[in-house]
Image (cartoon, grey):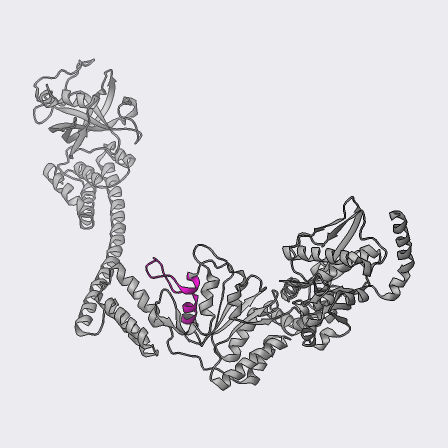
Amino acid sequence: MDEKDEIDQDIIPIDKPQKETKPAPVPGGVPYPNQLYLLPLNRRPFFPGMAAPIVIEPGAYYEVLKMVSKTDHKCLGLFLTKTEDANIYKIGLEDLHKVGVVARILRIIPMEQGGAQVVLNMEKRATITKPLKNKHLLAEVSYHEDPSQEHLSRELKAYSISIITTIKELLKLNPLFKEELQIFLGHSDFTEPGRLADFAVALTTATREDLQEVLETFDIEKRIDKALLLLKKELDISKLQSTINQRIEATISKSQREFFLREQLKAIKKELGMEKDDKTIDLQKFEERLKKRHVPEEVKKVIREEMDKLGALDIQSAEYAVCRNYVDWLTIVPWGINSKETHDLKKAEKILEEDHYGLKDIKERILEFIGVGKLTGGVKGSIICLVGPPGVGKTSIGKSVARALNRKFYRFSVGGMRDEAEIKGHRRTYIGAMPGKMIQALKYAQTMNPVIMLDEVDKMGASYHGDPASALLEVLDPEQNKDFLDHYLDVRCDLSNVLFIVTANILDTIPEPLKDRMEMLRLSGYIQTEKIEIAKKYLVPRNRELMGLKASNVVFTDGALAQIINGYAREAGVRSLENNIKKILRKVAVKIVRGKQTEKVTINEKNLSTYLGKPVFTSDRYYEVTPVGVTTGLAWTSMGGATLYVETVRYPAEKTEMKLTGQAGDVMKESAQIAWTYAQSNAGRYAPGIPFFEKSQVHMHIPEGATPKDGPSAGITMVTSLLSLLLNYPVRQDLGMTGELTLTGRILPIGGLKEKLIAARRSKVNVLIFPKENLRDYDELPEYLKKGLEVHFVETYDEVYKIAFPKEKLHELSPLVTKKAHKTRAARK
């Protein structure tokens, strides 16, 4: 038998009650039972006069429903739990409020998934008087009848009118109450104040506790007073909600109205030809650009084809975006637009002097460019490569050149670049393709003749993406760059009017074909005198202004600047010098802000250490007195010139040989081997009667072993060091030398003469030996660099020997040499 059949049965037994009591009479004829099965409610209580559906799931309460449905009275009790989240299957009668309602079953609708939906009519208040033992919730109850109100008091009548008025206001604000009001009118009469109060409370969203309190209020006047209070609160909430809704709806309505009006206006303008769509706007923008440019015919043909294609494409398609970007780049290149150059030599010279101190050769070359440009109608076909150590002003020279020529300036670094597409662009078949740096520079400058600086060209790399150094060959060749082809644009572009300025620290890592296309201009490091002038004229005033200071706040003496240069900033450039000046100015600024400094601060030798600490460098010389076997050489590095010591010692061994340490490169190792061979083959001339390191091993070391060194210019320095050890006689203290030695004793020229001379002055080495073929480089140096130096230019090592070991000094050594020779002969006999 299914559940539906069970519900339809006439008799379902109810557990026998513990005590028979007389049932309460009912006007309909069927009395209310004195014992009721109870259904707990978790959310909110019901009130008499209401009809409501309840879903009962399969289980204990469904069994109760089936039992009650078979009784004559069909009544059960609905009581609210004391806690809202109570488990109705595990509670007892003590967990329910004492006052609830008795409800009569009107209709039971079984559900397919089990259980049933029950329509109940709430009839009157009921109070639990005695709990009964049963597996279900069963209790004796008493019923409460509201007193008859045939003649309402004036107060109750006023309450009733207030409630009805409030309900009408609620109906205006919340139409959901209308349906419930109609149900109430079908079952109740407004002349009953108790029923009216119950209905009014049921309309509200009050808390379960407030509703239960009204349910437990049997006194009509108190009940209707509480009901009116809850109803007024509900009205205030509804008014607030209505205000919020109106405000939101007004905003939404306004936005929608504006949207429709704009769409209508757009449609009207489009019909009248007053406004066009995005595609038309793009095409008009491209046409406007073409009118301002003198586009070559070949390029114009490509642009027209692409614009026709663009006009036929749907604006939502992916190809439209690709085509639009391509036409955008084609039309944004400043075809035929050139800056009007300035060829005023005086103005250019003034600008160069304002920006840079010294650099006479560089300034002369730039003025030559401008002079030639005035005669030929423009500076073109020249690629300058500025080579020099960091901090000497290579990048800033590019800006000065652009300012002197009245051209736009664009700089980008190629250091670390490993993809040739950075130079020549990506092909349009790739996602995110874009032109190379050259086309981007033209877009930024909006002229076809800017000054483009390629920084750090000696630090380019290569990978599987290509070789950017090779890609630069086309860019930097005056014969090729007039037809430069960018992979993205895929049309020829004339770069011959661009002035390219390239910077590098060293030339060794630049490929020879690339070097061949550039004119090399060397920027050597600065000597102390130049650095002091640069600091006074440029570094101190500029950084003082950046720090918010004035000349009345802080000044530097020449002695302080000289001490900073010697003790803290010995690099070839002035970058470290500027950083130290900034450090001092920052400390002064802090003192002024804290109020500890009100008078002018003078930075001198005495107080310099309080700002910068102890000097980083004490001396460039390792030895105050040069020992036997040590010779001072001069070297060139990417950071400028430096002094280089070569040390040799001997110790007993079975086999005569030499070993070299000090992080020397392959070329320097070969120079050491040449020096050893030359000294050994000519020992009879330079050290007569002294065996060449017989039964001895020689160890040659170049200090600062952590620093890699390479180059052939230490050849004569190594031979001199070996002869000093062989003769057991020290080289003169103030002597420095550089030169490449051959096996026959000839001395070949070296590079970086100016840097090496500056390093010698810094180390107080006053007697210098240079190869004779470097005489032309020496003659071009300014006089202030050569002042106070004794310079010898030599062709063979014999001349070096005579300078390093003078005859009068060797004469003192002759008895020792003779004595050693006699001992050697005796030993051989």
Apparent side of residue 750 relative to residue 62 in the rendered image (left or right) = right
Relative to 380, is 324 above or below? above
Relative to 226, is 278 above or below? below
Q: Residue at image x 72%, y 77%?
A: 783
Range shown magenta: 421-442
Give percent across and percent down for residue 259. Answer: 23, 62
Apparent side of residue 444 relative to residue 455 in the rendered image (left or right) = left
Picture quadrant where residue 67 is located: top left
**Count of numbered labels shown in the rendering:** 0
Q: Residue at image x 36%, y 71%?
A: 492
419 and 347: which one is in front? Answer: 419
Give percent across and percent down for residue 773. Answer: 69, 72
Residue 221 seen from this side: yes
Q: Residue at image x 14%, y 23%?
A: 32
Residue 600 seen from this side: no
Q: Residue furthest bottom?
A: 375
Apparent side of residue 567 relative to residue 542 in the rendered image (left or right) = right
Give percent across and percent down for residue 780. Answer: 67, 76
Asked if the stretch drawn in magenta spans residue 637, the answer is: no
Q: Residue furthest front?
A: 829
Q: Quadrant of the N terminus?
A: top left
Q: Residue at image x 48%, y 59%?
A: 417
Give percent across and percent down for residue 534. Answer: 65, 72
Relative to 598, is 89 above or below? above
Picture quadrant where residue 504 is located: bottom right
Asked if the stretch drawn in magenta spans residue 434, the answer is: yes
374 and 676: which one is in front? Answer: 676
